Amino acid sequence: MRQLVSFVIPCYRSAQTIGKVVEEIGEAMAAQGKYRYEIILVNDASPDDTFEKIRELCGRQKNICGVNLARNFGQHAALMAGFRYVCGDIVVCLDDDGQTPAGEVGKLLSGIEAGSDVVYAKYTHKQHSLFRNFGSRVNEKMTRVMLGKPKELYISSYFAAKRFVVEEMLRYDNPYPYVIGLVLRTTKKISNVEVTHREREIGSSGYTLGKLLGLWFNGFTAFSVKPLRVATVIGVISACGGFAYGIYTVAKKFLNPAVPVGFSALMAAVVFFCGLILLMLGIIGEYIGRIYISMNNSPQYVIRECLDERDAD
């Protein structure tokens, strides 16, 4: 029997684009010929009529599953919700706006066939805004430093993974999922293939500065303790610097009693070190808060409705 490929697509404000993405997937898989496919569309509480469009698509094609989340949980939580419904041997994730070319999915599937556990699309020229490109660069640096991502590996939202990788990711049930971190801790057999990145035809990105910051916090607090170690190192350096400055001040007073001890320098030092203490406490508090929320069993997502009439074959 032909392998089944499951496409998981988080949807937000995509009522005008998701239909075209589904159509392109159908054309691409028909051209491949050797795979069966299904599509899981996850509506992340979009304020427009995205779920009504998903409902229409589910009624038109029996290989589409529609999932409607009760509120906006974010792209990564929506992916995790979609993973719960996949039946395929290979899982492909892509965006709902058409910028990730579904027509080039064959390149990702070929990478899986070549032996990779996960294959990420790599874009030579990204057609995002300057804000999104800056966010991508920061995210790339963060994953390298905090999560140990290889320097040559390019990470994007368009990727294919073997089923065992997704099953391992589903073992993570805490309320702050970060798909890239879950992939990196599951396997090292990850590769890239070059694909085209298109310009956005309709609408704008759903990522605001606040959402990007939240995503970065998820990455380095859920999967790395390096921020705490950095805080420890900074604390040690600051303490040593303060001790050395204290010795310098005392020595200067003994050598030249006429030199007044500067009140301004003292206040600057107090403000500086108090700021560092508050920063470190904030990082520690972020970890403790997330532990507390996880212990309260806060959900990754809440499903309001599921439309699933996929054919069994």
Image (cartoon, rainbow, N blue to C red):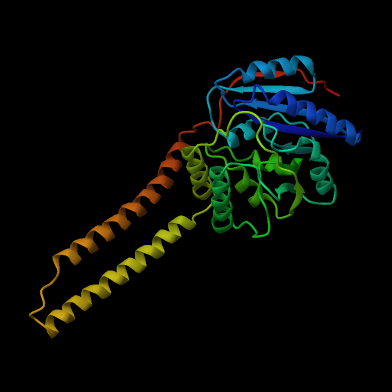
Above or below for 283 versus 229? above
Q: Quadrant of the C terminus?
A: top right
Extreme residue in the bottom direction: 255
Above or below for 267 versus 259? above
Q: Is residue 177 left or right of residue 101?
A: left
Which quarter of the figure has residue 141? bottom right
Q: Position of residue 116 (x, y in %)?
A: 78, 51
Extreme residue in the left direction: 258
Above or below for 134 versus 305? below
| Residue 121 showing in the rendered view | yes
Tag count in the figure? Answer: 0
Residue under the point 59% across and 37% down: 76
Q: Quadrant of the N terminus?
A: top right
Q: Is residue 114 left or right of residue 252?
A: right
Residue under the point 76% across and 40% down: 163
Above or below for 84 versus 197? above
| Residue 36 showing in the rendered view | no
Q: Position of residue 256 (x, y in %)?
A: 11, 83
Q: Is residue 223 left or right of residue 80?
A: left
Q: Relative to the observer, which residue lies in front, 132 or 65?
A: 132
Q: Position of residue 38 (x, y in %)?
A: 79, 28
Residue under the point 40% across and 65% down: 233
Q: Position of residue 10 (x, y in %)?
A: 64, 31
